[in-house]
Amino acid sequence: MNAVRPRLPCRARSWAFALAAASILVGGPCALVESAPAYAQTKPSNVADLVDSVADAVVNISATQTIEDKGASSDVPKGTPFDDMFEEFFRRHGINPRPRSHSAQSLGSGFVIDASGIVVTNNHVVGEANDIMVIFNDGRKLKAKVLGKDSKVDVAVLKVESNKPLKTVKFGDSDKMRVGDGVIAVGNPFGLGETVTAGIISARNRNIDSGPYDDFLQTDASINKGNSGGPLFNMQGEVVGINTAILSPSGGSIGIGFATPSASVMPVIAQLREFGETRRGWLGVRIQPVDDTIADSLGLGLARGALIAGVDEKGPAKPAGLQAGDVIVKFDGKDIKESRDLPRLVASMPVGKSVEVVVIRDGKEVTKTVTLGRLEDGEAKTASLEDEKQQQQSAVEKGLGMEFSALTPDLRKTFNIKDSIKGVVVTSVDPGSAAAERGLKPGDVIEEVNHEAVANPADVAKAIANAKKAGGKKPALLLVSNGEGLSRFVAVPSD
């Protein structure tokens, strides 16, 4: 399939004339242009046989989402004296005040990987769709359900029921693709229907800041709106990528398209098929890039690896002995050339696997063994803690005209609070509030609320809420201590 550059005429002009003239000395004016070198290739040509072998496995996808439209309803809350007036107004003018709905539709592409009806596409193609239809090359339309989807690598796995086996395609090894290798993209650009474009791999390992695991193949094969989710084939008819994004000021192809490599999506697809969700490895560290300055200060020589900026107290890295300041240079036998390499490697590992992590510490290589946790569990814990912290802070800030905080070593030092004192420290008091009038000030420690011991801001919020439920406007009785441990009771209105 190598394209051969055509012969130039002997009357070559421009730059070709100058080169031909120089060649007279070594073999005549036409000797230079007898044939093109073996590496001189253009876009793949004559891929008809390849297209015939894969076309029936490539599908179009129509995803429809029903969206509630509340634009016609009144902004006045229910239960007001104006209810009857607004209902009468809407009735007289023929307006239905109830929420209306409309449909939003997206078109994309996909491909069949299992004859039982397993279809792969992009997550952003299906989104939160209520109805997904898979349209085959022969015109058949089959309703699909989502087996699982993942926004981080933008992949979704669908299932359709067919009364006959479906044509399938298989994945190839994207890691073997080189810059310059020929590829073809098949999809549904602009809703036109199945379309084939050809090109080459323009670059590898592209980061376009679309997600935490960016590692795209770049291609000049035309990829346009509607191609999303479609396959990028190598010249053997194997899927080496899922067409996902383009770089374009106009929204159309300018020759810069991106496909998620098969090596990135295959483990995710397997997890979505088996579990309906992802189960990624988790190391439990916060990392940052290593620049030349950091590399020099740590004695690394060349900038490389991922610098650990923090270690999760409940993550796998902590018991394994990894520390802030360590530079991870190798993970499970693979070199970490830059920090963004690490999250992809860790996420691709099975949960529970023990891996060797090589770090630079104090100028020396140190090897630690880490048993990986599950990323999704770690994210859930972090989100739960953040939500709880936010709720605690907002709930207490609205009560009693004060702001509170858990007693940390820094706050004990700031307010000179003895280690033996337990409770929640007051960090600020609103001027003119009931708390300020009763002499409460920053640095006071609330030990009890209504005779209930408190250890964190959530306890204070709960006690205040209980006081409101039990006694209406009954004051909250606080046991307050100063930094020296002298205690007193203070009654503060809880409304």
Image (tube, rainbow, N blue to C red):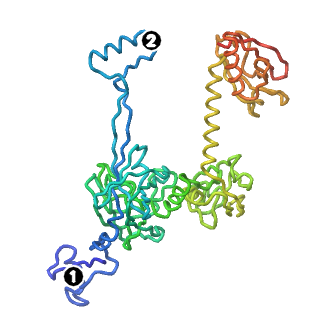
The residue at 23%/83% (across/down) is: 33
Q: Position of residue 291 (x, y in %)?
A: 57, 55
In-front residue for pair 219/114: 114
Task: Determine the secondary structure under disc 1.
Answer: helix
Q: Position of residue 182 (x, y in %)?
A: 35, 70
Residue 11, image quadrant = bottom left
Q: Is residue 97 above or below residue 79?
A: below
| 195 sits left or right of 390 in the view | left
Q: Is residue 21 above or below residue 279?
A: below
Evaluate if marks 1 and 2 touch, with contact meaning CB atoms under 8 Å apart.
no
Q: Position of residue 204 (x, y in %)?
A: 44, 64
Tell me the distance, in whole angstroms, between the alpha carbons under discs 1 and 2.
Answer: 91 Å
In-front residue for pair 70/257: 70
Badge 2 amino acid: Thr
- Dot 1 crowding, Cα within 10 Å, few <14, some 14–19, many 20+: many
Residue that lies at the very extreme toward the front in this rendered image = 163
Q: Which residue is mark 1?
A: 20
Q: Is residue 123 above or below residue 164?
A: above
| 176 sits left or right of 92 in the view | right
Badge 1 amino acid: Ala
**Residue 55 visible in the picture:** yes
Q: Which residue is mark 2?
A: 80
The residue at 69%/62% (across/down) is: 354
Residue 381, image quadrant = top right
Q: Which mark is residue 154?
A: none
Q: Is residue 16 above or below residue 305?
A: below
